[in-house]
Image: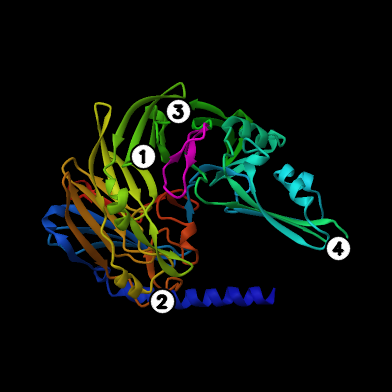
Amino acid sequence: MRKSLWVAFFWMGLALVGIPLAWALVDSGKERILITEEVLGGDPEEASGVTLRVASHWSGNLLWDTEYTVGSGQAARSGFTFSAGGLEWGYGQRRSASADFLYGAGYGTAMTVEGSLLNPESVLYPEIARAVAGRTRDGEALRETVRIGDYYEYYPAIEFGIQGTSVDYSIECGQSGDYLSELFRIPTAEDRIEVTLERDQAGDFISCAWEKVLDSGSAVLADASAFGETGCYYAFCLEDPQTGERAHRGENCGLFYLPFTGEDGWIQVDRTRMRRIGSLPEDAVPVGMLLEEDRERLYLTVKGKEDYNLVVYKLSDGVPELLQVAALGQERLFGAEGAEGSRYLADLDIELELLAAEFSSMTREEGGLLMTWSDNGFSFVTEEDGACALWCSGQFPEQSEEEYMGTGRGWTANHMFPGERACLFDGERLVLAAFEDWDSLNVLLAVYDRDGETYSGLYRHSGTQDDLHGMDRNRMRPQGRENYSFLEERYLTDVYVRGTGEEVKALELCPAKEFTR
């Protein structure tokens, strides 16, 4: 208790020190917040008239709304408000559904069971456990690699879970595992599993561990999901983890629907009510899904053999009818030549590492659909007379590795764009923008026409302090960015003010003539 009080006094002290420092900043005038333009490439005239709005805060008490219009010749304008109690932010639910073979679900590709009296008949794959148990001596542990198909023709254990919300599965009475195994009906083929069993000196089993062996011929589940008011759409197939291509075993893959009920952030689900409602295009690996119930449309982003594609379905009484398949212009990610350029800098365990690019998100924007990839790649699709067409594709600009490693900000590499960005489309140009990194108010902005990028620039916000560590409280941050949180668990879209429900947008792009305050 005494330790908790000291911790509370410590943070209160930091706040008391930080707020006067921030007031000193404010006292010098709102005009102190400056935005300066740094051209990275192309002609700044291409962005002329675009208004950049940044909503920032200091400790939740001091709040700024800053506007800067590119090409206007005018300085940034800022509005300032003070919240004595300090604002707190809430975050909208980002629900998703995924399935996995049960020995990997929730455990990567492995699971361990331990107990003083472990019964091999009660663990996963009991036939395998029984066989290995017969070869395990008292007081020893035995590890074996087993072909699952020698014991099971189809996977007997499939787990399907919903993330991003509170879920009640109690109505199922433990029946979902067998039902899903029969529904998906995935052959085990040549898949192998490493099993480790251990007996104590008395001959009782005390440990059982499972780990999937990923090698040539193995398969993993690739899936995507989207949620409506009363149900979840889900798509899955098998994927070769080494080639990234679809694997065919005769499984019951395709589009599925799972109804649910619920309110106040809770949903009640009976997975034995999931049903198959449609098929996937040949060789398509689902990576992203977007549902628009009001327009009766279901959009599915899939990976093919030579490009990514957008698959459009019309929903008739909830049943999907294939309307169109449109290419997304991401051929650079395929083949020997594309492999070199399809890697991005990521921060894993505080170490920078190059990873293969993967699909990130699909969102509805004003005028079209925006798809992004983890290496800052994107595709923008417009719709006319009910038909979708690729308007442009490319890569959003980023800092070089050398620049990033020198900033000292935050825990995550500077790939804000794939998940957090602003978008403006006026029919002639596509404008994209994203914060430089999680702790920065600097904004990277790029303009595109149908042929590609016409301009890119960095708009430096004077509130960004490069010499402070990301967890330092006494600094300005984007509104919605908490002082003490791991940013991998937070985001800057779907944010609201707790208590009022008011929507918060840390970064916006608007035409100058339409942007009023």
Rendered image: mark on residue 20: 2
Q: Residue furthest top?
A: 317
Q: Quarter of the image holding residue 68?
A: bottom left
Query: What separation in Å lies between label 2 and label 3 (alpha carbons)?
Result: 61 Å
Q: How is the image coloured?
A: rainbow
Q: Is residue 447 left or right of residue 283?
A: left
Q: N-terminal of the two: label 2 or label 1?
A: 2
Q: Disc 1 marks which amino acid?
A: Gly
Q: Disc 2 marks which amino acid?
A: Pro
What residue sits right under mark 3 in the picture?
Answer: 279
Query: What separation in Å lies between label 4 and label 1 (alpha carbons)?
Result: 54 Å
Query: What separation in Å lies between label 1 and label 3 (alpha carbons)?
Result: 15 Å
Query: What separation in Å lies between label 4 and label 3 (alpha carbons)?
Result: 54 Å
Write the residue at 24% across / 57% down.
445
Q: Nearer the viewer, mark 4 or mark 3?
A: 4
Q: Nearer the viewer, mark 2 or mark 3?
A: 3
Q: Quarter of the image holding residue 302?
A: top left
